[in-house]
Image: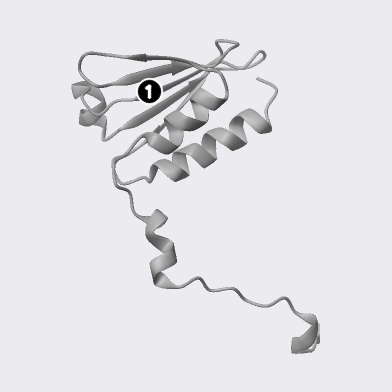
Amino acid sequence: MNASATLLPAVVRPAVEDRRWLSTDHCAGPVLDLLDALGWTMVDTPEANVHATSPDGRVYVGWLPEDAAAWKRGALWQVRVQPADGDAWVQEFGLHTPAEAVAGFLAALVAHSSL
């Protein structure tokens, strides 16, 4: 294909300082704010873990900074899904996964699924 440069979309390269979201600060805020806005039930434990359940009960999200078993697996976040039809599945995210990435995953999950 031979296309002139004027027909191609411009390449956008954000400045390095605009990419701070690419590294995590270990803050659960972006995920918990999203789940709260979606009306999920959230429970904080005395150990500082947070457990959230979707309104229909088919999705669980755990923020597990003080869960020894999760740390052994290298997990900070756990998402468990029980579809209406099909097998349950689990996705875990580690310490170095930005909370914004986990929030994006969850936003896509609830927006584009018929759990």
The residue lying at 53 percent from left, 33 percent from top is 106
Residue 40 in the image: state x and y as whole percent: 52, 17
Quarter of the picture containing the N terminus is bottom right
Determine whether the residue tagged by mark 1 lies in a helix, strand or loop.
strand
Give 74 or 27, whichever is nearer the viewer. 27
Residue 78, relative to residue 103: is it above or below? above
- Horizontal side of 66 relative to 13 (left or right) equals left
Residue bearing the label numbered 1: 62
Residue 98 screen position, x and y as percent: 38, 46
Residue 66 point in image, percent of width and height: 20, 24
> What is the quadrant of residue 73 in the picture?
top left
Q: In this view, does 77 lie above or below 57?
A: below
- Number of marks: 1
Image quadrant in which you'd find residue 8 = bottom right
Q: Nearer the viewer, residue 114 or 49?
A: 49
What residue is shown at x 30% (from left), y 32% (from top)? 76
Side (left or right) of 24 relative to 8: left
* Quarter of the picture holding the C terminus: top right
At 44% from the left and 65% from the top, the residue drawn is 18
Residue type at the position of mark 1: Gly
Residue 85 x/y as whole percent: 67, 14
**Which coloring applies here?**
one colour
Q: Which residue is drawn at 57% across and 24% down?
A: 38
Q: Does residue 74 appear to the left or right of 2 in the view shown?
A: left
Within 10 Å of the Cα at label 1, are there few (<14), some (14-19), or many (20+) other Cα atoms?
many
Query: In terms of depth relative to the viewer, which is nearer, 81 or 56?
Result: 56
